[in-house]
Amino acid sequence: MNFSEYRRHDAVALSAAVADGRVSPSDLLDTALARLQAVGPQLNPVARLLEAQARAQLTSLDLEKPSGPLAGVPFLLKDAGQELAGVPSSLGSRALRRPALQDSHYTRRCKAAGLVIFGQTNAPELALKGVTDPAAYGRTSNPWDPTRTPGGSSGGAAAAVASGIVPMAGGGDGGGSIRIPAACCGLVGLRPSRGRISEGPAAGEVWLGCNSQGVITRSVRDSALMLDILSGPEPGDPFVIAPPKLPYAQVIGQTPRRLHIAWSVASPIGAEVHPEAVAAVRHSVTLLERLGHRCEEARPDIDGQLLARSYLQMYFALIPAALAKARAEGAQERDFEPLTRVMACLGASQSGGRLVTAMAQWNDFGRALGRLHAQYDLYLTPTLASPPQPHGTGDPPAWQVGLLSALRASGLLGLLGRAGLLDGAIDQIARDNLRHMPFTQLANVTGTPAISLPLHWTDDGLPLGVQFHGPHGSEDLLLQLAAELEAAQPWFNRLPLG
């Protein structure tokens, strides 16, 4: 199968071609590797190539009768939270090189589905950013415009899918990290409900429950089938979420009922929203109403600034804990990026009481969103406040990182932080970090599902997705609507050049 034909297939179609003998898994792997070789130097989507492991996996398959719903389809894991036994899960850091002792449940289920894993995609250090620029593995670029970011933290995954290396790739979403790159790269990005996909066995909940594993795809049916494959509890999981009444792959074949959908284009943190992001939502509202859905401008009664601060309180607290765990496993602190070390120091200067207070507020946000969903089936917003940004946008200036690093080395940074004298600096970092992506954290702190769909392209030809939130456990409704919108405005064949 040549690349042109390969790219015309989603994962479901590729597995069907393998099943009926039109193509072999090894041929598909060869095509994926050739595409990676062609675009990798420009885009840098893969942090770690695992061709030898993939070839070994192929030899263990019954190539005459490959099993699994996606048997033989090439696949990439994210270099964060999707462990493969014997291979480092380095989270985009040169400090973390310890091989995983066992497969994660996510990886095990991918293998059982017949997916052929041949690499790990690039991610920012500790998966902390909405861009993908780790010092350890280099910056990843957007296939639609290589001068721009593909988003993050699953930016390598999105670049790999948009450029045609794979039809879908693994992602994780702790603050928008599936939806942000999907929106930047013209793809489908579903963040499942908290508890839908196991984080085990290495963890119970990641990012204090904010993170969900998932995939970035080009088709809704790939997203639905992968949710079927990945969903379900494992022994020791913190809690069990009710399964759907029907498999998601079947649910998307049913037309959703006519929905009442709230929508808003106002930034939760009061920042500017680009006219293209506004246009993306308004176009989606027009499309929804044409399909018979009822749309009304409304938003949950939530203080967006307070939500951002409470989210970032958790974010800052996680970094020193991550560095402490890494040091205990033999990592050297000097191997972490300077900004990561600064943020770890700032995080360590914050009190545990502030973190507990912040997390208690998450309940308030969840109740407010629940009240909105008592009136509206879904909630529509931009995924991003602006089109994909040029590389380097939002980075703190070098002098600021240098000054903070010097203060950290002297011990003054921690003292100032504990005295509360750096609260303004932390708030500024927060505002700079979230101003281009203020819409995604609501789903993470409330544990609710949300999906980004590629329903808009800018006048410059850049994708800019829109986001639908649903109540907890409503992935079936989100996927039903996504399939209806995909049929009404197909995007699968809208591809970047090259």
Image (cartoon, rainbow, N blue to C red):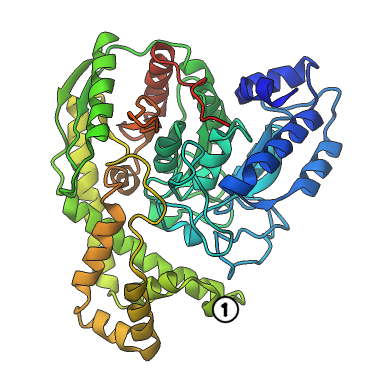
* Placement of 45 over or under 227, stated as above or below: below
Viewer-proximal residue among 245 and 110: 110
Q: Nearer the viewer, residue 247 or 240?
A: 247
Residue 364 can be seen in this image: yes
Residue 404 lies left or right of residue 289; in this view the side is: right
- Front position in the image: 318 or 239: 318
SS at mark 1 in the image: loop
Image height of 308 relative to 471, above or below = below
Q: Looking at the picture, which amino acid does disc 1 mark?
A: Gln
The answer to which image quadrant residue 424 occupies is bottom left
**Quarter the N terminus occupies:** top right
Q: Is residue 445 left or right of residue 133?
A: left
Measured along the vertical axis of the image, is residue 323 above or below residue 481?
below
How many marks on residues?
Answer: 1
Which image quarter holds the C terminus? Answer: top right
Q: What x and y, as percent, mark residue 44?
A: 59, 49
Q: Position of residue 448 (x, y in %)?
A: 34, 39
Q: Residue at x 39, y 10 (%)?
A: 255
Q: Residue at x 36, y 33 (%)?
A: 464
Percent coordinates x, y for residue 63 in the rendering: 84, 27
Residue designated by label 1? 332
